[in-house]
Image (spheres, rainbow, N blue to C red):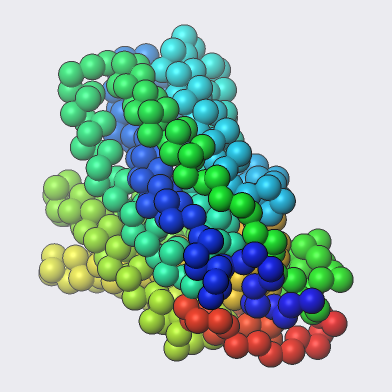
Amino acid sequence: MTSLGTPASGAATGTGDRTRPRAALPALCLTQIVSWGIAYYAFPVLNPQITSATGWPTGATTAAFSLALVVSALAGIRVGRILDRRGPRTVMTAGSVLGVISLLIVAAAPNLPVFIAGWMLAGLAMAATFYQPAFAALTRWWAPDHVRALTIVTLAGGLASTVFAPLTAALADQLSWRHTYLVLAAILATVTIPTHALALRAPWPDAPTSRAHAAAGAAGVGRSRPFLLLAAAFTLSSFAMYAVVIALVPLLLERGYTTSQAAWALGIGGAGQTLGRTLYAALARRTTATARTTILIALGALTTAAFATALGPYALIIAVSVVAGMVRGNLTLLQATAITDRWGTTHYGHLSGLLAAPAHTAAALAPFAGAALAVPLGGYRPLFLLLAAVSLGAALIAPWTATGAVRRGSGRRPAIVTDRSAE
């Protein structure tokens, strides 16, 4: 029996480096860009044209997209279990096929109910093709050096909006929204289906096991106090973070900045997000999982409060946006490594699905909730103060998520300590 964090037979260490599928990492970088760019970032670009051409209410079309994110969050639990047993190839290839079919349904939708049904199917595709299955694949194949691989794939994924937002806009200038989605569906099919089918064929290594957690299994960990508190902290943090992203432009418009200035302030956060992800490995080497969870969520609260209180100058707003983006970038990797850092990789897919479901649901609902709360609160400044308080509450929960199982999340083999409470 191997200890937590120690790869079992067939896992990637030492000689395992030679068995890692070399094509998997660049392939997943490519498919994350294309999948996120087409299934996620194309919608906000096309939605004004969709509502103008069809007469469907903006709230209804946006709700259909948010419903896809909720479906993705809930389906991720089941997807995670399949990933643990069978690996990513079948899941991600089938998800790519579903993604193409869903976009064809959306493009051809004669009415709003069919449009909503197409997005619900897209939610299943998102669960099978977005970060969660890619993280599961890299965590198992690359352990114990998975932080580096996860960082690379999230850096690539961060390019999705940079590539596909302008590409979608260019297509929409020449084509109807329906034909634009048909072109995007063709790109999705051409790139992701064969890439997932061919590049993810490597044998799926046995998961490491742990004396401390083998008896309890995924169900026992999922019911444990540290896991439930971690899920609560990530859910509150995700709600606040995504509400801030959507509400930033209205906040700045409320303060008299132009639409262009507000858009640049939002967009520059993406550059900060990419920069932040390059720093995560260094942070992981120097902190425990619990410490960096507390620090990063608290920094999220601090940057949200800074948005609420910083009236200007504009350069200060830009600086806050860059720092907020850096925090968001680190939070993505924090959530990707949270399971491994505390409970190892044995049930990574299942547990990451359980952990992500409430957080992703909160993220999907945050834009609507934020806009709804801004009215009774009297504007976006009070909303940002409330969101800062929500993040602060998450940061106060974070110290209670320690398990004593894995001390540090470095790129090297993690240090092991005994978790007596789990034995």
Give the residue displayed 31% in from the left and 16% down from the top.
179
Q: Is residue 384 above or below residue 42?
A: below
Q: Is residue 318 above or below residue 52?
A: below
Q: Is residue 111 above or below residue 229?
A: above
Residue sitting nearer the eye, 33 or 226: 33
Give the residue displayed 36% in from the left and 19% down from the top.
182
Residue 248: where, in percent of width, then height? 31, 55
Residue sitting nearer the eye, 264 or 213: 213
Residue 211 in sight:
yes
Residue 147: where, in percent of width, then height? 46, 70
Give the residue displayed 60% in from the left and 39% down from the top.
90
Residue 301 in sight:
no
Q: Is residue 303 above or below residue 56?
A: below
Q: Is residue 173 left or right of residue 197?
A: left
Rendered-image quadrant of the N terminus: bottom right
Location of residue 143 by image quarter: bottom right
Residue 135: where, in percent of width, then height? 52, 57
